[in-house]
Amino acid sequence: MQDTMVKEAVLKGGEFLVKDAQISDTFIPEEMNEEQLMVRNMLRDFLTREILPNADKIENQEDNIAATLLEKLAELGLLGSHMPEAYGGLEMDTNVNTIICDTLGPSGAFTVSYAVQTGIGMLPILYFGNEQQKTEYLSKLISGELKAAYCLTEPSSGSDALAAKTRADLSADGKHYILNGQKMWISNAGFADLLIVFAQIGGDKFTGFIVDAHAEGVTRGAEEKKLGIKGSSTRQLFFENVKVPVENVLGEVGKGHLIAFNALNTGRFKLCALSLGGAKESVTTAIQYANERIQFKVPIANFGAIKHKLAEQAIRLFAGESALYFVSNLMEEKKKALDEEGASFGDAKLKAAEEYAIECAILKVVGSEVLDYVVDETLQIHGGMGYSEEGTAARAYRDSRINRIYEGTNEINRLLTVDMLLRRAMKGKFDLVGPAWAVQKELASMPGFEQPTGAYGKEVKALKDFKKAILMVAGAAAKMQMDGQLNLKEEQEIVMNVADMMIDLLQAEATLLRVQKLSKMEAKHPQEVYDAILRVFLTDMTARMNKNGTDALVSFAEGDLLRTMLMGLNRFTKYQPTNVKADRRLIAGRMIEANEYCF
């Protein structure tokens, strides 16, 4: 009975907005068990031995290095760590697989080759393939015998993926589909053996196919000349009367959108893990340079402006990582529950990722924007040397920029975050109306201020109030839409304001849970350091929440309604003033002393 109660308490997708998460809901990197540490150390060794020494080879795509590295990872079993044993996989849990991506983050452009192979290259077959397709293809992808690419984007269809024009027509004998069209920005295209291709059957049935990349009629364009991730093979692919056996239809005819969108949930999650792993390496690069660079007879790490940058890098990274592992654990708990209900391995993974699609969209934004901030400040700390290609700062800066574009642009992911939240609520997945209405009643009555009590009482209260602020803004906008006074599809700025508030909230709650958990265990640093990270994040978040809420409210409300809600917003976006300068110096000091990112 007790186990059942615990499982029922695990948050549903999007429910973090209306319910308080429990410490038991999260996993934190500081509590890795022996198996998880072993996997991480094995990957660190692989990174040090095989990837980092070959950085220039990867950058220049020499000796088919990306394909070779994939094969070497396969020898360690790590292309199939998330795959069923029946096809040669290791069936490691979600948290272990998150650790794998996190640890491989410093691999630069190779992270793209790895993510495509293990994510959007394999998962569509695991999720939607029939048994024959899984048996034939998954084992070869896991062993590295086959390399995969995912072919969705076209010159005229990017964010609007369903507008694809690539066409498939059934042959006269009914044995093949004849594929004609063009795909662009295809990662791994230069060395892929197997392609997941989306096309319109008969011009109007969006469908997925498994295509032999070496089939007659498949041609590859030249390598794209890109701003960054130069070490990732990116080409156009052309299909001219390519014969695809009918048994290579993936999933159901006309249901290709299910494959495309569900593969992206996990892709977004993995992108966050890889981005944050890369950000850790970049912070270390910044710290080590700041300790070595002497100006005015002292290391520049001594200067307050540099300490501010280093601390802010660490704070954003710590908060993003906390959210990543929080969601990782929710997905693992959901997968376990589905396993117990008798779901297949693939279905359990698919439905767990689908359940937390909102969180995956948020994490994609968080990971890519944290990495962008970190590499930018690392370059700035290097000064003129950062602009030189002699070091790693410039390459990391260039490589980072793509992450805000692919797997759905960050603008699309922000819009999806709110759209999926409202859709889930309308379908009865969880109660959004009740909590939103409770906030409206509280605004009308304006009760006295609740005095926080206990350890982290002020932080717990601040989070509860932040949730009320979001519910108030989103609820008012949704009501005006229901009343016909507002069309949120045409008011993207308002939706993005709400999304940014949700993005901050998920990170804040996960960071609080992590800090609370650390306070109950023997941690690497004094608790005051973790408390400082939490305080600064909440302090800065308070200002952002108020700004986003205000911008949204004045966009659609006026008169007494606006005044009342602005009063409520000010009430719900309060947090104790804190000496952020002292806290940042404390955080930076730990890293400067360690000469690396050490959280």
Image (cartoon, grey):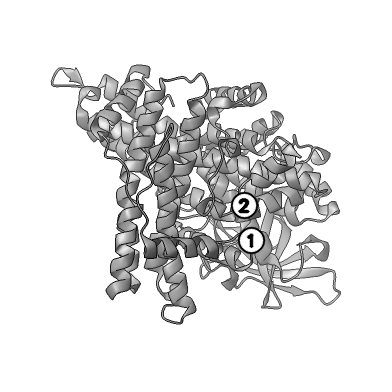
Measuring 33% from the left and 67% from the top, which residue is drawn there?
553
Q: Nearer the viewer, residue 551 or 60?
A: 551
Picture layout, residue 334 above or below residue 564: above
Query: Which numbered circle lies on residue 429?
Result: 1
C-alpha gap between disc 1 and disc 2 = 8 Å
Query: Which numbered circle lies on residue 353?
Result: none
Question: What number of labels is visible?
Answer: 2
Find residue 98 and report its image quarter: top right
Q: Nearer the viewer, residue 222 or 435?
A: 435
Measuring 31% from the left and 66% from the top, which residue is drawn there?
564
Q: Quadrant of the N terminus?
A: top right
Residue 124 visible in rendering: yes
Find residue 399 and report its image quarter: top left
Q: Nearer the viewer, residue 307 or 391?
A: 307
Residue, disc 2: 12
Tell me whether circle 1 and circle 2 mark residues in contact (CB < 8 Å).
Answer: yes
Q: Amino acid at mark 1?
A: Lys
Q: Position of residue 413 (x, y in %)?
A: 49, 58
For this view, does 278 lie left or right of residue 103? left
